[in-house]
Amino acid sequence: MRIAILGAHKVGKTTLAEKLHETLSDYEFYSEPYFELQEMGFDFSEMPTADDYMIQLEHSLKQIVRSNRNAIFDRCSIDLLAYALAVDDKLNFSSIFNKIQNSIKEIDVFVFVPIEKPDRILCSASDLPELSYEVNDIIRELIDDFDLEVIEVNGNLSERLNQIQNKIEH
């Protein structure tokens, strides 16, 4: 199955994705598009723009297309769209809506790692905490807009992993 981990930055999403990959070692692991694109030489703005996020979104769509049936994605088009919308509230994503909708049909399980209260991972001022909270809220809206069934996890890493495994087994 294809599993996509959604969430804003500084919520433990990557740690969870990597730990999940350890338990599902026969799965392919797809890093955040940002890191894959950076490795390929792409130079992002110091302060990310909507265009930066849309480039990552397009790359995320390609990751899904080239993946095997068993794959774990650390981010997908949903959270990248949330970032693009957070930095540009006038962004018109209607041109890419169908692409996103078609690609997410290929995802079997969506795992949403929300910001918890109290926040488990402190987000320093340089980590743009306002952006993190805004993206968290937009992801929630997009989950509704795209009518996604998600596993929303909370707690420590072990608890989050157990919540995913329990849902997958049933």
Image (tube, rainbow, N blue to C red):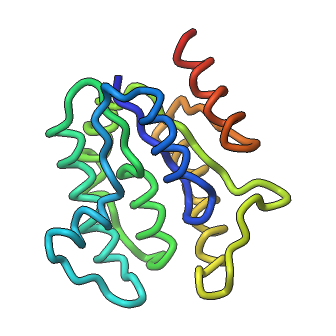
The image quadrant of residue 132 is bottom right
Q: Is 97 in front, or is 61?
A: 61
Q: Position of residue 131 (x, y in %)?
A: 59, 75
Q: Position of residue 76 (x, y in %)?
A: 37, 49
At x 43%, y 76%, the residue is 90
Quarter of the picture containing the N terminus is top left
At x 46%, y 40%, the residue is 146
Image height of 81 relative to 47, above or below: above
At x 60%, y 54%, the residue is 12
- In the picture as drawn, the residue positioned furthest to the bottom comes out as 46
- In the picture as drawn, the residue positioned furthest to the top comes out as 170
Quarter of the picture containing the C terminus is top right
The image quadrant of residue 126 is bottom right
Image height of 75 relative to 162, above or below: below
Q: How many marks?
A: 0
Q: Is 58 in front, or is 9?
A: 9
116 sits left or right of 30 in the view:
right
